[in-house]
Image (tube, grey):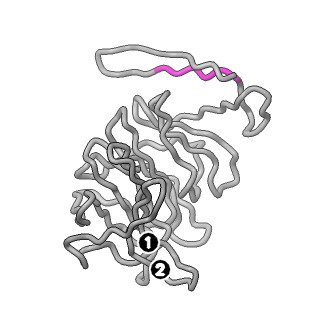
Amino acid sequence: YRAHIALAERFGGIDTSGTSQNDLWAWNGITWTQLIPSNSPGSPSARDDFGMAYDAARSEVVLFGGNDSSGNRNDTWLWNGSNWSQASPATVPPAREAPGMAYNAVLGQTVMFGGTTGGTNYLNDTWVWNGTNWTEGTTPSGLSGRIAPNDMTYDAALGQVILYSGISPDMDTWEWGLPANFGSVNVCPSGQTSPAPCSNTLALTYNVPGTDFGATKVLT
């Protein structure tokens, strides 16, 4: 979603005939409009189960991987509102489909987690995109591999990327933010019993070089 122009954009996927597509559409709240890149056919291949997030700092959509006619991909594409361009990062995450991706506005980075290389071969690696390169992040041992294409989002009030469950054995909640790694939250609203264990108070402590600060968020 491009907040500054109030447009939601979507790419590719599988149509009703089971065929992968590589078309791009924008929703303005009333109608869908197909976006035709001016440098077409310089677009990602037709595919599904890719990761995609909007990088607000650089005003571009970031797309990674997915599955096309050749199998799982590990390419990175950027959409600036007019054209697609394929990035050439020095470090590239392994090919995958169905990862979770979300943009953290506080850190100015896109976070990607998990996915699969096929079937139940779930990945539990964490990667961060800074606009030019991917860097592997730290994944805690308790965060299991999973498919999470629709289970990551950004919580602007807390400045955290939130990951909930996904296709995995665990109904757990994790956050990614300062100091830029995942940590277990285990928080649920008052009266809710799942995911467990949980409490009604979330204590956040951030450690930033040269600065120490913290906050407590009480959920009611």
Residue 88 placed where, x, y %?
A: 21, 62
Residue at position x 44%, y 30% in the image:
159
Q: Secondary structure at mark 2?
A: strand
Q: Marks 1 and 2, how far apart in space?
A: 7 Å
Q: Are marks 1 and 2 in contact (CB under 8 Å)?
A: yes
In this view, 209 is above or below 113: above
**Of label 1 and label 2, which has the lower sequence position?**
1
Residue at position x 51%, y 63% in the image:
98
Q: Secondary structure at mark 1?
A: strand
Q: Is residue 185 visible?
A: yes
Relative placement, left or right, of 154 versus 212 is right
Number of callouts: 2
Residue at position x 61%, y 45% in the image:
164
Residue 27 placed where, x, y %?
A: 44, 59
Name the residue carrying label 2: 20
Magenta span includes 10? no
Q: Is residue 136 visible?
A: no
The label number, if any, that marks residue 12 in the structure image:
1
Type of amino acid under label 2: Ser
Residue 92 placed where, x, y %?
A: 31, 60
Residue at position x 53%, y 47% in the image:
152
- Which segment did they paint magenta? 200-205
What is the magenta segment's predominant secondary structure?
Answer: strand
